[in-house]
Image: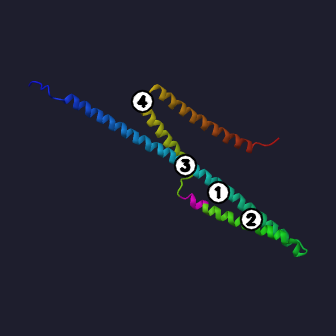
Amino acid sequence: MARNFDDDAPRRMRDADELISARKRDADERIYVVTTNRVIDAQEKLARRRRLDRIWRAGWAVSWLSLLTAVIGTGIAALTAGDPARFVLGDLICGSLLLLSLLSLLALVGVHFAGRDLPTLQRAEAQLASAQEQLWQQKADRRPALDDRRDLYREEVATAVEQYQADSRKYRRSTTACSPSS
């Protein structure tokens, strides 16, 4: 059978290949955007969890210290013999400390309910690490040019250095807290 020179099969094949390539690029770009959004979401959740944990610890410290101070102050005032009018100022201070303790306990309840929908600190850190790894893998799978590969390498190294510095600070704090002072 003779070839028909009006046949445009090569052009149609080339157009189909370009269409497939364009759709694949679009799909890869959408996946990249979704993964980037997951990283941002994980970073926000981790920051929020850390902030709530700090508030929680500070609230407990304030609550217990004010309650303990109020109870001790009230006990001292009650056990001390003398004119009750002398202890009006002390009673006012103890009462305000009790009120502060109550308010901080209420704030702790609010912090607890605010953090119910958030994962634990360890889980949030794991989710962030997983999302960052997926994002880095997608960047590497694109078979980037040399300059882009260098940027990926620098980004990976910077992340590793930050992690090592954070671990170093953490271990330094724990060893200085545990070491006996001279």
3 vs 2, front mark: 3
How crowded pointer 1 is (Cα within 10 Å; few <14, some 14-19, many 20+) is rated as many
Q: How far separated are the C-alphas under marks 1 and 3?
A: 18 Å
Name the residue beneath numbered marker 4: 143
Q: How far separated are the C-alphas under marks 2 and 1?
A: 16 Å
**Front in this rendered view, residue 119 or 135:** 135
Q: How far separated are the C-alphas under marks 3 and 4?
A: 29 Å
Q: Secondary structure at mark 1?
A: helix
Nearer-N-terminus badge (4/2): 2
Q: Residue 151's mark?
A: none
**Front in this rendered view, residue 126 or 181:** 126
- Looking at the rendering, the stretch of residues picked out in magenta corresponds to 111-116
1 vs 4, front mark: 4
Q: Quadrant of residue 78?
A: bottom right
4 vs 2, front mark: 4
Residue occupying the far front of the picture: 6
Q: How far separated are the C-alphas under marks 1 and 4?
A: 46 Å
Q: Amino acid at mark 2?
A: Leu
Nearer-N-terminus badge (2/1): 1
Q: Amino acid at mark 1?
A: Trp
Q: Residue 67's mark?
A: 2
How crowded pointer 4 is (Cα within 10 Å; few <14, some 14-19, many 20+) is rated as few
Q: Amino acid at mark 3?
A: Glu
- Name the residue located 36 percent from the left edge and 36 percent from the top edge: 25
Q: Is residue 55 above or below residue 78?
A: above
Q: How far separated are the C-alphas under marks 3 and 2?
A: 34 Å
